[in-house]
Structure formats: C-alpha cells, structure tokens
Image: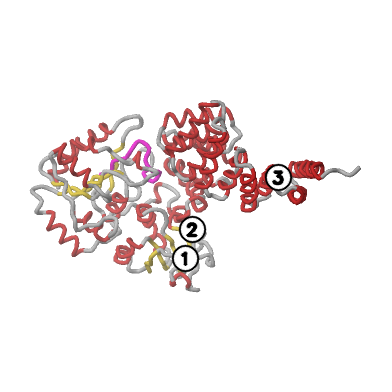
C-alpha cells in the first residue's frame, strides 16, 4: 500500500532533521525542500528550512523562509523569534527588535526573546531599553546566565560599576564557559580600577578564544595604563580589528615593521579621535630622525596646524576615496600612527615629552591676546569642563558645582575653551557663582582647530578635564592642569601627576572611591599662588 502525501512529508521532515543534527545541511535542505513541494503551505517546514539555512550560513535565504512561515501562521511566537535571530546575524537590529516585540506580545513570558531583545537593543546602543528587556527576562527567571552576562555588559555602558560587577559575577557563576562572561566582568572590574583582576579575566577569555580581538584590545589598555609597554603595545595592535577608524585604505603598500627608514617614504595614517591623533603624532619626529620621509594623513581640521608645524613632511587630509598622493608607487611602507609606540615607546625612558611641537597662527594668537587683555586685571585662564564622548563622558566630567572654588577666585579672568553648546552651563555659572565666563563668539572649536590652537596659545594657562583640549594645549606648550577621574583613559596612566606625552601638562587625580572635592582641594592649594605668578 502506497504512503499518503502526509506520511511522505513527515518522513522527509524527520530525515531533514536528522541530517541537520548531523551537520549535513545540504542534505537537510534537500529533504525539507522536497517536503515543501508536496505541502507548500507547511509553516513548520518553512521554519525548519529557515533554521537550516541560518546554520548553513545563508541568513538572507533564512529570512525568506521564516517570513513565509509567519505569513502562514502569524500567531506562533517561535517563528518571529527565529526571524529576529536571523536579522541580528545580518546586523539589522531594528528589524530584529520589531520581530522580538511581536514574539513577546504573543508569549509575554518568553525569556529567550526578552534576553535577545536586550541584545538587539545593545546592538543599537540603546542601553536603557536593553536594560529594561534584560531585567524583564531575569524577573521571570533569575537563573538565566546569558541574561546576567548581557546585564553586565549593559551596566558597563551605563557606568553602573557595582551593579555591573554583581551582574558579571552572577553570569560567571551560571555560565562560566560563555566567552562574554569573563570579558564583560573584566570590563566592569577595569572600570573600577581593578586592573590586575580585570587582566586575569581578559586572559581567561583569550584562553577560551585566542583570536578574540576585543579581549586583546581591552588587555592592552590595562597593560599600557600600568606602563607595561613591552607587552601592552603588542596587544594594542588588535585595535585595528576592533576600531574601524584605524583601517587602511591603501592596501598595496606593506606594513612597516621596524625596517631601516633612511631615504624611505612612509605613509602614516592618523587614527581614532582628534586627541589621540595629536598624542600619537608626538612620535612622527622619531620617524624623521631615522631618515624617513613622511606622508601624514590626518583629520582635515589638523591639516593647517601640521603643515605649519612639520614643513619637512607632506600632510594630507584623511578622505574616502583614497587621496591621490597615496596612490604613489614611491611609498615604501604604511603604518597607523598608534602603532609607532611598538617601536619608539617600549619603556618609560623612551618617552620624549615635548615642550611644544605644534605652532599656532602667530597673527591670530596676537589678536586674541590683545582681546583677552581687555577682560580685566590678572591672568586669563582657559577652562573646559566636560567631554561629549558618549562612551567615556561619565569619568571625564567634573560637574559644574565642584568648580565653584576655582571659578570664584579673584584677580583672574576665565575664557571658555569648551566645545559644544555651553550657553546653559554658562548661565548657571553666572547665576550660582556670580562669575562671567567669557565665550569668544569668533571661535568655533569644533569647526576650526586653527582657531582653537590660537585661543589656547593666547591664554596664560588651561584648566580642563580629560578631552581634546588637553592634547592640543600640551602640543602647543601651554601650561595645563588636567582634572582626571579615578579611572582615566589609559594614556594618562595610573599614578602619574606628570604626562609622558606633554611637558606642560600636569595631572590632578580624583582618588579611587573618593570624590571631586578632593581634586578641587588639591588644585586650590596651589592655584591662588599660581595666579599671582602669571
């Protein structure tokens, strides 16, 4: 007696499942496709074929079959969930979020969907919404290890230190074999200044996944912060796999790996943000001293400054498509400017902090000095009090209320060096401190670094939190007092009150687990006397 079509379909599906479980995806696809030719409106078969396509590495085709399954049976939550997983693999997080919300509407206690919704929000950097989704999953089931790991990652981004550590430890307890578990906990501990513990967790992550670039990169920050340059710079190279701002466009030229440079033409590419580009370019002189000829490709706002300051090199603007000068067959090597540390800064003694290496427009400096001399008696102090960095702002902002002792000092004038819209801040300072902060409307810090450089050179000293202002002031040789949080960026190191990069920069550090009052007290012990000398 011949089998009915239904029996044939069931047999094909079961055979397809067996092939799928054995990792024989092509055979599995063949079986399910045969089943669908018999019953094209079989939602389960479309869903299964989508699962197989996803496992086989063809997510675009998986989307088609999950969508078909949903079209046939829109009320089954798993179909929407599987579609969301596929969108996440395609980095289409908005579509994933929509599908996951539908799945959760259909099944409110769907903890896997809630946890994945949190991950999708993380992909969009929507940290508050991610936290809400993860918290909802953990409220239903507090033993979801992956959710605790995700929670740790979210808390890291929200800079909720103790909560991040607690979540990370719970995640490690429940799923220690998940690669992200030690990594996220390591990030949480590093943010609290527990660098040795954090480094141990990054190394644990790398034992599980030796090629995990993020763990190498995070480890490099800890090592460099602790002045372990010999190992730290090597780990720092993994940033080129993590931070896409360090990717070369000119791939026909070999990397420079320490070869002799006399008479050789080197393309150095600026990388990361403005501050880092300035800081790393303190090493361009090392290339020149070895007899190398340099093309420095940097952010366009730096070009006029660098052309004036380094007349012996070619300075061009970072752009896409690649600049015509970088198509020259005469270029011998290429290197990212941050990679120069591997060769020139392998120990503390190898650092050569410069008094000044950037030259501002002298006419503009003179004009601004004359303008600021009319503000009143006493020296002019440039101030900057916050960072606009979304990732690091929490540890790079001293709230305005703590500036009161500094801003109420007599016999000096304050000029804003702060970029961004600061009208509300200055109004608050005027109201609360009865102090006018001069905002030079002729200066556009975000648009013209030529103007910023001249302004910084025109003031008598700078007091600033850690932002691009400090790097520019240090490169210009302006005396600068920098206010650091308890866990600053790696390039300010752990305990130093001086800077290895700039001679004119001095650090005032917020003690770990201390408060900003301590920093301000340290500044106020010296600032009145300093003002009298300026």
Find disc 1 in the rendering and name its residue.
261
Q: Quadrant of residue 177?
A: top right
x and y percentages locating residue 468 in the rendered image: 32, 51
* 112 or 155, nearer to the observer: 112
Instruction: Please name the residue shown 58% across and 28% down the image.
Output: 174
Instruction: Please name the residue shown 46% across and 67% down the image.
Output: 321
User: Of circles 1 and 3, which is in front?
Assistant: 3
Residue 483 in the magenta stretch? The answer is yes
x and y percentages locating residue 230 in the rendered image: 48, 47
Q: Are dots 2 and 3 in contact, CB under 8 Å? A: no
Which comes before the other along the chain, label 2 or label 1?
2
User: In this rendering, is residue 200 above or below 451?
Assistant: above
Looking at the image, how many numbered discs can be counted on the residues? 3
* 40 or 78, nearer to the observer: 40
Residue 490 in the magenta stretch? The answer is yes
Find disc 2 in the rendering and name its residue.
247
């Amino acid at each position: 007696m011949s089998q009915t079509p239904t029996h044939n379909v069931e047999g094909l599906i079961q055979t397809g499942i067996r092939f799928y479980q054995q990792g024989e995806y092509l055979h599995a696809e063949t079986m399910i496709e045969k089943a669908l030719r018999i019953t094209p409106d079989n939602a389960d078969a479309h869903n299964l074929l989508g699962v197989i396509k996803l496992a086989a590495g063809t997510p675009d085709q998986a989307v088609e079959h999950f969508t078909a399954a949903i079209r046939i049976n829109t009320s089954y939550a798993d179909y929407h969930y599987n579609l969301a997983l596929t969108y996440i693999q395609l980095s289409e997080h908005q579509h994933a979020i929509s599908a996951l919300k539908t799945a959760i509407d259909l099944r409110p206690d769907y903890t896997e969907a809630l946890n994945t919704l949190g991950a999708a929000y993380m992909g969009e950097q929507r940290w508050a919404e991610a936290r809400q989704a993860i918290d909802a999953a953990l409220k239903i089931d507090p033993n979801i290890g992956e959710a605790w790991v995700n929670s740790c990652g979210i808390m890291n981004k929200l800079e909720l230190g103790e909560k991040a550590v607690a979540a990370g430890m719970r995640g490690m307890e429940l799923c220690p074999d998940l690669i992200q578990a030690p990594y996220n906990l390591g990030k949480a501990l590093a943010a609290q200044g527990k660098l040795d513990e954090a480094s141990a967790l990054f190394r644990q992550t790398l034992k599980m996944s030796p090629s995990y670039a993020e763990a190498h990169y995070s480890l490099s920050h800890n090592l460099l912060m602790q002045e372990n340059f010999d190992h730290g710079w090597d780990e720092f190279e993994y940033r080129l796999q993590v931070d896409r701002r360090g990717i070369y466009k000119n791939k026909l030229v070999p990397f420079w790996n320490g070869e002799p440079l006399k008479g050789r033409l080197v393309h150095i590419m600026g990388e990361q943000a403005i501050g880092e580009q300035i800081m790393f370019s303190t090493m361009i002189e090392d290339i020149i001293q070895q007899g190398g000829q340099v093309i420095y490709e940097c952010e366009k706002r730096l070009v006029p400054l660098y052309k004036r300051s380094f007349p012996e090199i070619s300075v061009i603007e970072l752009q896409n498509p690649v600049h015509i000068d970088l198509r020259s067959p005469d270029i011998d090597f290429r290197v990212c400017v941050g990679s120069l540390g591997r060769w020139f800064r392998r120990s503390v003694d190898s650092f050569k902090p410069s008094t000044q290496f950037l030259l501002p427009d002298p006419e503009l400096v003179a004009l601004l000095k004359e303008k600021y001399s009319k503000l009143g008696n006493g020296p002019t102090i440039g101030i900057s009090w916050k960072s606009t960095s979304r990732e690091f702002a929490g540890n790079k902002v001293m709230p305005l209320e703590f500036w009161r002792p500094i801003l109420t000092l007599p016999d000096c004038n304050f000029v804003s060096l702060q970029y961004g819209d600061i009208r509300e801040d200055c109004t608050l300072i005027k109201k609360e401190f009865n102090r006018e902060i001069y905002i030079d409307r002729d200066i556009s810090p975000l648009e013209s670094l030529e103007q910023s450089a001249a302004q910084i050179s025109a003031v008598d000293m700078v007091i600033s939190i850690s932002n691009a202002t400090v790097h520019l002031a240090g490169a210009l040789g302006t005396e600068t007092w920098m206010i650091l949080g308890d866990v600053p960026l790696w390039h300010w190191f752990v305990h130093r009150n001086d800077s290895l990069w700039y001679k004119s920069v001095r650090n005032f550090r917020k003690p770990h687990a201390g408060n900003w009052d301590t920093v301000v007290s340290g500044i106020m012990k010296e600032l009145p006397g300093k003002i009298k000398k300026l």
